[in-house]
């Protein structure tokens, strides 16, 4: 590439030198937040190792759709796909060729470039049936593309990339998602409690084979516009729609795929003829729909057999008491004293101490699990319990020393900021008269490291100035968890999943430059009530892995009577001093290079490594065990990250009490303690799942009736040994009222 052209690219983008196999050359991550200098640009262009140049995506809102046609084996397949895909984009996005920049890649694929305030990280959008690699994916934050300066396929060049509207980006993504293969949506039929099909073709299978979905949805809901018949699909349009079309009916599967959300049919999912028929004629009742089709003659006339009773799988729960023996003995004694004399909860205190250690350690320590795999001890903790059982007092008793240091840092900043603002308000003459010729007041840096309610933008801003860690402590996690259900591009959920994994995060703004944290470390701690937690723990947050990262403590906590025992003030003072010294010790040990924290890496001893390998393999056995509870299977992979993190936290705190002896190696004993802690959280997850299942069963029984006594009767008929306290809570009545109603029911 000519030097003048290269420098023009450098002026318009953040560019990166590319070495062998299209791999970025040098420390390319720096160019995600700032451009390469002119000198480095020219210097790198002359190196023989540099084989070309790339454009950093995500920088200044650049996003690129990468269409990888290598998944096809023949040229005709590649050309047919690209022709059809491009034609569809042009039909649905007004003036497509003048809004997007398109370049052909060396391998025969294509790059579609545009800018958007909605840019996110690299995302796989579509994968064809029978293929392992994605055919359409994005290059966004944290990505790059190779420059093909002579392969322009559109009216505009690299130097004319412009912002597109959110609507155009949504259409672009929706059309691309339509090429993603997934099994057609086929809701399960609720089996009759007494009979079930024993053999033959079911009514819904027969219906899907014989009926064209177009006969179901047209002309009542949709129509086929002019030119709607294509080689691989038929275009349909909703009556009254302003867009070019509302979706497709694919000829190979016979299924419907909608972009539009303005109908009774779900968008962005494959819909079979049976599914569409059920929605249209039976309001989503699949059992009624199947029965209807059977009487119409669909499906084999089959014999029926008695259905085996359903056995509900319930995980076996072992000990759920917090293992305080993972901590040094003086700390164990202090926790027990608080439990006995201040009526604090051991589980809540133990979890709070883990969070405190995590906040203090931050980016200053990491653990090398094996070559190429390091973990930092970020933990998320949810303390589950009814209101009034002492969650907040137990938390405060443990984290108070850290909060005190945090408050001190806030006050210090406010004082320094006041001085800075007063100095800035003075004229040059006044500054000289009051302070002298060369006196300056530097702008203060925020050193607050614990936050409660805060926006993501403010959180990232603060973390930029506190790069070791930023702890989030919320009395109630309900608001935080609600945001996790908003799984959309650029959502809070994506941000938090990245921070848990230690991936860099970037928050873009409409008004000014975005914020970027290369090494986020944000431990989370908070309390929540069981019923609220069960309502917020959705299938979506379970499927995307968020809930599996959340460590749960759910002790048998109840309100206690007053205890006439006094806590020793010296013990409280001792604990406060221990934690304060621990904080400042770690702060002094923090290593930096060029302003960045260099973590102290801790490794396993030989025996510690052997125990870790055993634990890893035992977790793997549970993942592969067909008899293991399905709810927990997705949780186990996260424990493979949490066990090393627990080991690191336990080890650092232990090393502090031993005057930092052997602080770089983790013993087998510490690994065993980490395993014990992992088992504690797994068993609590089982307990929460059982509680959630029980609550769901009770609510289902309650739906069968209207009045309170009728609801109670339905619950009693379903299970005479039901949980009286839980039902009282769900019905909003007292246990005494339940017993009164039960007497009437039993008569």
Image (cartoon, rainbow, N blue to C red):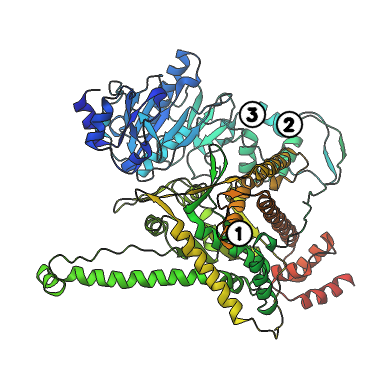
CA neighbours of label 1 inside 10 A, class few (<14), some (14 to 19), many (20+):
some
Comparing 334 with 661, the one in front is 661
x%, y% of residue 52? 32, 24
CA gap between label 2 and label 3 equals: 10 Å
Quadrant holding the C terminus: bottom right
Q: Which residue is mark 3?
A: 211
Mark closer to the observer (3, 1) = 1
CB of mark 2 within 8 Å of CB of mark 3? Answer: no
Q: Nearer the viewer, residue 366 or 162?
A: 366
Which quarter of the figure has residue 254?
top right
Is residue 244 depicted above or below 83 in this figure?
below
Which residue in the structure is indicated by mark 2?
A: 298
Separation (CA) of disc 3 from disc 1:
69 Å
Point out the tag, 3 or 1, that comes first from the N-terminus: 3
Left/right of residue 121 with respect to residue 605 in the rendered view: left
What residue lies at 77% left-to-right and 75% top-to-bottom?
735
- Is 251 in front, or is 511? 511
Q: In which quadrant of the rendered image does the N terminus lie?
A: top left
Considering every residue shown, the one lying at the far bottom of the view is 564
Across and down, in percent, residue 355 comes to 56, 61
Q: Which residue is mark 1?
A: 654
Left/right of residue 461 with respect to residue 161 in the rendered view: right
Q: Residues within 10 Å of mark 2 (few under 14, many from 20)?
A: many
Where residue 228 appears, as percent x and y from the top left, is 45, 27
Dot in front, 2 or 1? 1
- In the rendered image, residue 46, in percent from the top left (x then y), is placed at 26, 24
Q: Nearer the viewer, residue 637 or 30?
A: 30
| 107 with respect to 728 (left or right) | left
Q: Secondary structure at mark 3?
A: loop
Alpha carbon separation for disc pair 2 and 1 = 70 Å
Which of the 4 image quarters holds residue 459?
A: bottom left
């Amino acid at each position: 590439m000519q030097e003048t052209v290269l420098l023009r690219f450098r002026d318009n983008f953040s560019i990166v030198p590319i070495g062998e196999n299209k791999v970025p050359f040098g420390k390319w991550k720096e160019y995600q937040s700032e451009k390469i200098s002119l000198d480095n640009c020219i210097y790198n262009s002359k190196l023989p190792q540099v084989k070309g140049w790339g454009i950093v995506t995500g920088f200044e809102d650049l996003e690129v759709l990468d269409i990888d046609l290598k998944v096809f084996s023949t040229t005709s397949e590649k050309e047919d796909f690209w022709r059809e895909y491009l034609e569809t984009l042009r039909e649905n996005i007004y003036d497509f060729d003048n809004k997007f920049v398109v370049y052909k890649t060396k391998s025969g694929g294509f790059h579609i470039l545009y800018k958007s305030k909605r840019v996110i990280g690299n995302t796989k959008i579509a994968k064809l049936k029978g293929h392992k690699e994605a055919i359409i994916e994005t290059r966004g934050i944290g990505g790059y593309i190779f420059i093909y300066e002579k392969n322009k396929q559109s009216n505009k060049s690299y130097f004319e990339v412009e912002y597109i509207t959110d609507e155009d980006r949504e259409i672009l993504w929706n059309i691309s998602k339509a090429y993603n293969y997934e099994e057609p949506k086929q809701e399960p039929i609720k089996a009759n409690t007494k009979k079930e099909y024993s053999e033959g073709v079911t009514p819904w299978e027969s219906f899907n084979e014989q009926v064209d979905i177009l006969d179901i949805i047209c002309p009542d809901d949709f129509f086929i516009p002019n030119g709607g018949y294509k080689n691989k699909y038929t275009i349909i349009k909703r009556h009254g729609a302003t867009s070019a079309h509302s979706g497709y009916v694919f000829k190979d599967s016979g299924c419907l795929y909608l972009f539009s959300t303005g109908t009774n049919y779900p968008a962005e999912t494959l819909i079979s003829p049976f599914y569409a028929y059920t929605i249209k004629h039976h309001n989503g009742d699949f059992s009624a729909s199947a029965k209807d089709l059977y009487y119409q003659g669909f499906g084999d006339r089959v014999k029926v057999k008695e259905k085996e009773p359903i056995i509900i799988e319930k995980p076996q729960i072992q000990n759920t008491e917090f293992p305080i023996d993972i901590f040094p003995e003086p700390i164990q004694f202090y926790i027990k004293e608080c439990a006995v004399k201040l009526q604090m909860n051991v589980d809540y205190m133990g979890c709070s101490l883990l969070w405190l250690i995590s906040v203090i350690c931050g980016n200053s320590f990491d653990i090398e699990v094996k070559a190429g795999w390091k973990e930092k001890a970020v933990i998320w903790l949810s303390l589950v319990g009814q209101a009034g059982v002492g969650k907040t007092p137990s938390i405060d008793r443990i984290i108070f020393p850290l909060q005190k240091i945090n408050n001190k840092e806030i006050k210090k900043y406010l004082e320094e900021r006041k001085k800075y603002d007063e100095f800035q308000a003075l004229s040059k003459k006044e500054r000289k008269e009051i302070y002298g010729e060369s006196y300056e007041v530097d702008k203060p840096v925020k050193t607050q490291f614990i936050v409660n309610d805060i926006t993501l933008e403010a959180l990232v801003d603060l973390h930029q100035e506190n790069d070791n860690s930023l702890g989030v402590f919320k009395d109630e996690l309900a608001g935080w968890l609600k945001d996790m259900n908003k799984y959309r591009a650029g959502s809070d959920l994506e941000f938090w999943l990245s921070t848990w994994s230690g991936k860099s995060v970037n928050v873009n703004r409409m008004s000014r430059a975005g914020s970027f944290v290369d090494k986020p470390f944000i431990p989370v701690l908070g309390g929540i009530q069981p019923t609220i937690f069960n309502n917020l723990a959705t299938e979506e947050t379970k499927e995307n892995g968020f809930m599996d990262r959340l460590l749960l403590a759910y002790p048998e906590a109840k309100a206690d009577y007053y205890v006439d025992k006094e806590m020793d003030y010296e013990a409280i003072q001792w604990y406060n001093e221990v934690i304060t010294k621990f904080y400042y010790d770690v702060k002094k040990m923090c290593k930096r290079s060029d302003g960045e924290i260099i973590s102290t890496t801790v490794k396993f001893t030989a025996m510690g490594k052997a125990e870790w390998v055993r634990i890893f393999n035992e977790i793997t056995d549970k993942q592969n065990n067909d008899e293991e509870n399905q709810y927990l299977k997705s949780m186990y992979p996260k424990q493979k990250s949490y066990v090393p993190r627990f080991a690191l936290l336990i080890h650092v705190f232990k090393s502090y009490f031993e005057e930092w002896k052997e602080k770089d190696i983790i013993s087998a004993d510490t690994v065993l303690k980490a395993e014990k802690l992992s088992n504690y959280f797994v068993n609590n997850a089982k307990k929460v799942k059982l509680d959630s299942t029980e609550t769901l069963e009770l609510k289902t029984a309650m739906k069968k009736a209207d009045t309170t006594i009728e609801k109670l009767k339905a619950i009693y008929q379903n299970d005479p040994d039901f949980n009286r306290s839980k039902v009282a809570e769900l019905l909003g009545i007292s246990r005494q009222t339940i017993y009164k109603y039960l007497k009437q029911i039993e008569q």
